[in-house]
Every structure is written in structure tokens, then in C-alpha cells.
Image: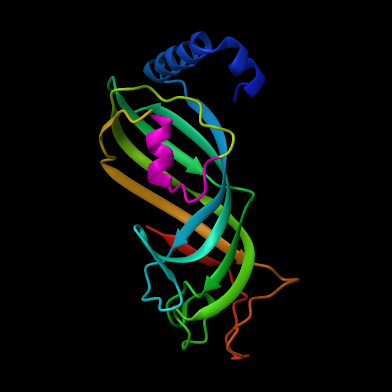
Amino acid sequence: MRKSAIVALVAGPALALGIAASAATAASAGTAFKTTTISPEHPDTTGVTCPACLQGPGGPIWANDHLKESVTVASAGAPGHYNVTIAVGGSSFQGFADPRANGEAGSNGTNSGGPLFSQGSISGSIHYNDITSSNPPQELPAILAPNTGLVATLKKLFNNGITAPAVSTHYSFSYKPSVTIPPVDPTGNSSDTWSQVYSQVG
């Protein structure tokens, strides 16, 4: 669990070293190391051609997320090798473009990548298998800076010690649009709807 910010300020470097040492010990013993954080302005990307999206380094951005990230780190079987899972239960999104391919999750087949105002909840997780790091995992800050992506979160988790990226990555996220404030096409296309859960899996 995250240590209190007040305790961290009082204890200073000694506590930080203690956290790193316990994380290394936990990982080597096969016990999971856990930490949590909030990414309040997380850019969400899509793989569709998206003229209504913003263009970011990770791809077309269709929404701004408020992610509650629960991070679990376990040994990948060798010193300095780690498996990481980031789960995002209890999170939400606010979209301004349609992330769905035509005909996907109830899309009417005409607005893929077009303008669409939406909001709702996100659940799911991403798994990074066999990350190599010269540093053990450490506590994440309570709140991440705006536009902090998952790769940047991993760098913070390992204090910039990653020497080789994950051997494989698997993810599954589900987006459930709000029932009380349903998605709406700002161009006035009333047939452009989104009522079903939309999933991104890879």
C-alpha cells in the first residue's frame, strides 16, 4: 500500500531506500509488490483512422481518461526481471471522437473516427511480461502529471531503470457509455449512437 505523504516527507531518503529494498526482496521472493496512483488526464488512443482525434505520440487520441491505476509487480523468474499488471477499475472517460471501427459495438457504420461526445466508465487491465530493470519497483506518486501515458508510468515505477522493454504485452479494456448522459454526435447525426460496451483487446 502507498505510504502516507506526510510520513514520506518526515522519513526522507531512509524511507525511500526501505521501500526499494522491500520491493526488491518481495520480487525476489515471489511476493507481489503493489502500488496505486491516479492519472487524472490520461490520453486514450484508438487504432482507427480518426479525423476528429487529436494526434499524439501514441496514436490518435479520442478521449481524456481519469484512471485509477492499481499496479502489481511480480518476479519474472530471474533477478531484475519483472511482470507488471496495471488494472483500471473504477475509472472513467470523456470522449470527443468515435474510437470504434464501422459496425463495432453498435456503431451505425458511418462515423468511425468522426466527432462523438461521450462519457462513461472504463474497466480492464494491461499486462507487461518480463520487463528488465536495473532498479526495483518503487511507490508511485499519488497523482500523476497530466498526459502521463502507461509507458511513462512504467518508467516512474522503475525509477528510469528499464533496460529492456516487456517481451510481450497483453491488454483488455472495456468502455461502457453513460445511460443518463448518452453519447451524441455534435454534427446533428441522430442515427450515430453508442449503447453497447466497446472493448479494446490486444
Looking at the rendered image, the quarter that the C terminus falls into is bottom left
Which one is in front, 52 or 29?
52
Residue 17 versus residue 147 in the image, above or below: above
Identified at 34% across, 22% down, the residue is: 135
The answer to if 151 sits in the magenta stretch is yes
Residues drawn in magenta: 144-158
The answer to if 81 sits in the magenta stretch is no
Which one is in front, 117 or 198?
117
Identified at 36% across, 41% down, the residue is: 128
Q: Residue 201: where, in percent of width, then height?
A: 42, 59
Which one is in front, 84 or 157?
157
Q: Residue 107: where, in percent of width, then height?
A: 52, 81
Question: Which quarter of the picture shows residue 132?
Answer: top left
141 left or right, relative to 58: right
Question: What colour scheme governs how the chains and residues are painted in the rendered image of this protein?
Answer: rainbow
Extreme residue in the top direction? 14
Which one is in front, 153 or 195?
153
Identified at 56% across, 63% down, the residue is: 175
Marks counted in the figure total 0
Looking at the rendered image, the quarter that the N terminus falls into is top right
Identified at 47% across, 77% down, the residue is: 104
Extreme residue in the right direction? 180
Residue 105 versus residue 23 in the image, above or below: below
121 left or right, relative to 72: right
Q: Residue 56: where, in percent of width, then height?
A: 38, 61
Q: Residue 36: where, in percent of width, then height?
A: 56, 34
